[in-house]
Amino acid sequence: MQVIIRPTEEESTRIVATLVANAIRANPDVVLGLATGLTMERVYALLVRMHREESLDFSLVRTFNLDEYVGLTAEDGRSYHAYMTKHLFSGINIDRRNTHLLDGMAKDLEAECRRYEDLIRHCGGIDLQLLGIGRDGHIGFNEPGSALYSRTRDKSLTPMTRRDNAKHFVDPSQMPHRALTMGVGTILDSRKLLLLATGESKAAVIAKAVEGPITSRMTATAIQLHQHCVVVADEAASSRLEEQDYYRWIFDNEPEWAEFR
Ligand code: GLP
């Protein structure tokens, strides 16, 4: 795992957006795994700007989102379908037939999850998976207790996740109790992982995800098992990491990071 610590939210976000843009330029039909949440909104705003100002071409890019709420239609403004249209897809030249999300309205949720796993496999697997992190340590909606080998399935949300995400619902009581999510095992199958965390509210969870013992109680700790994982965090989110000096030395000295210094 590589941990990149940058002074500000802006700089951390810029590195993540640039790594995604580099992956697209290196491989125009790259398969991206996409995440949602406030942290990712800023990454998507930069990618839209790169498309407009630097001709970043999404025409062949294929995408799979991590998760979707159960019981919300794609047209519902609070769904992750709507989030993706608003924050990314409507601002870039992606072919909507190449954008894939789970259907939280499917009659047979198990079959829907199987369909999604098959489709990911059919596309050759995910090349680069973007990840945010929930305050309870979830990646996707893999809440505490999710098996580290889990596949795409239906998951009940914790009270903390429901409280955190209720801010996107005018009436918080309408916040869904369940979601479909790629499993931890599905996420770990991606060729590369790129996790972004910003702000003081993520400091405790980032310290555990990066340096704590691997446990299904906090599924983000599973990223430690992955051979190509980059974690980008700002000062605030990285403030409780014990090996900070080491991570900073690598960023300041390794040629891989020269373009970002
Ligand atoms: C939701 C998503 C997660 C994401 C999290 C972080 O719970 N299902 O994939 O990591 O939000 O959200 P934020 O960036 O708003 O803190």
Image (cartoon, rainbow, N blue to C red):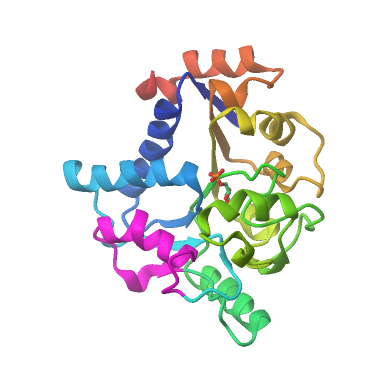
Can you name the residue that lies furthest to the bottom here? 107
* Percent coordinates x, y for residue 179 in the rendering: 64, 67
Q: Residue 173: x and y, percent?
A: 63, 64
In the rendered image, is residue 251 in sight? yes
Residues shaded magenta:
74-100
Quadrant position of residue 68 = bottom right
Query: Is the residue 254 above or below the residue 102 in the image?
Result: above
Percent position of residue 5, x then y:
53, 22
- Rendered image quadrant of residue 76: bottom left
Is 80 included in the stretch rendered in magenta?
Answer: yes
**Relative to residue 4, is residue 142 drawn left or right?**
right
- For this view, does 85 lie left or right of residue 9? left
Pick the residue in front: 138 or 124.
Answer: 138
Question: Is residue 1 something that shows in the picture?
Answer: no
Give the quadrant of the N terminus.
top right
Foreground residue among 133 and 251: 133
User: Residue drawn at (41%, 32%), measured in percent from left and top?
Assistant: 15
Placement of the C terminus among the 4 image quadrants: top left
Residue 53 in the image: above or below residue 121: above
Q: Is residue 40 magenta?
A: no
